[in-house]
Image (spheres, rainbow, N blue to C red):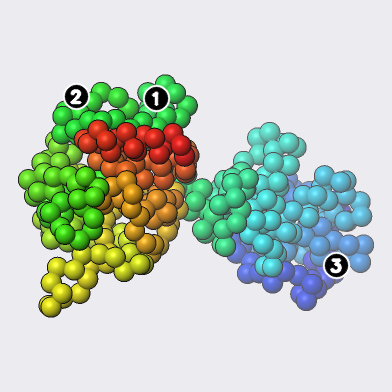
Amino acid sequence: MKLIPISQITIERETRQRRELTGLDELAESIRRNAPAMPETGGLIHPIVVTQELVLVAGERRLTACRDILQYDSIPVNFVDELDNTTLLLLELEENTRRIDLPWQDKARAIAKYNDLRKEIDPAWTQQATAAALGLGQSTVAQNIAVSENLSNPRVAQAPKFSVARGIVQRNADRKDNQTIENIRDSVSAPRQQFIFNADFNEWSRTYEGPKFNLLHCDFPYGIGADRFAQGSAGSHGGYDDSSETYWRLLGSLAQNLDRIAAPSCHIVFWFSLNYYQETLEFFAKNTDFKIDKFPLIWFKSDGSGILPDPNRGPRRVYETALFGARGDRKIVGAVANAYACPIVSGRHMSEKPEPMLRHFFRMLVDAESLVLDPTAGSGSAIRAAKSLKAKHVVGLELNPEFAKLAAEAIDGG
């Protein structure tokens, strides 16, 4: 290290990464505080780096703070050709964090690697010290290190922007924290389970004592008499009781036993008829602690299938809607579009929801930490969709024994 007059040091602006020099006042104050204990360097913990021709290589913020704020005439320097390999690597990483054209993935890796190397040299080194050395905010450093640690996750690594990757990592962390708090993982004995039970949700929910679920997928009968429709092949698929009494009774069972079946942090996807839109919203608001998004999820039946209530006076209804909500501050896995187009399916159940459509919406909610309950599973398509996304534990209930048998066979065969 040598003391060199600041006026002799050249900053070749055209070769520098053009970046605003932030936090100069704070940096100058830090240097000033260190000066009494480090008189030989004027308070600089790390000298700037220059070539033998006194062209600046690294440390422009330090040089600027010393020159413009502290009014130093000289500054300690290291010559780049005299540095050891570790110091040169730190120098390269420090410069990379300032490059405007550096992909966000490489910048995150550079910040994390810089912090790791500093800790190897000095075990007392902190992320705050990294932030000060690189001219970044402490939260920025922490976020980049967290993202770097998760770059093995393809969803993180392939995110188009750092902000998107940061959001994915934060949501995953929040979901894992919630999972630990709820202690759900410990209450499930098998690594992964998928069950279809022949059971009445109204009865089952009153006595259930197993693990609490963090995703409820509810496709109750809509209460619109669809079992009597001439359209939709209801008769050929066995039918079911689709009275308004059935709909509201199932909703009542859900609300009354919510704490028994649902985790404090839980999502819900609730299919409903627009005939009862306002009433259903009011029911959730008055009887549950779910916060329901005012924008529903939409399945558009791309083959044009649907009910035509009055051929002379109105259109065919070719979409179905689902409320989406959460209790607690449960984060999603990742955002998806709130509408999906695909044709209907037939063969097992008169109102079967297509598995591709359910899988689309479940990508927002289901991962390896998910415990999923479908209280009226029908054909089991929701169970199969959740299983395909590696949900940890999935339970479906179906009142009709034949439907339950077919659903179980479809899962075993899938």
Q: Is residue 35 left or right of residue 226?
A: right
Q: Residue at x 40, y 39 (%)?
A: 410
Residue most extreme to the front:
236
Q: Which residue is mark 2?
A: 207
Amino acid type at circle 2 is Thr
Q: Are marks 2 and 3 in contact (CB under 8 Å)?
A: no
Amino acid type at circle 1 is Val
Vertically, is 121 above or below 277?
A: above
**Foreground disc of the pair 2, 3:** 2
Q: CA distance from mark 3 to mark 1?
A: 64 Å
Q: Residue at x 72, y 55 (%)?
A: 94
Mark 2 / mark 1, whichever is N-terminal: 1
Q: Which residue is mark 1?
A: 188
**Which numbered disc covers residue 387?**
none
Q: Position of residue 91 (x, y in %)?
A: 78, 53
Residue most extreme to the left:
245
Q: CA distance from mark 2 to mark 3?
A: 77 Å
Q: For this rendering, which residue is in front, 128 or 231?
A: 231
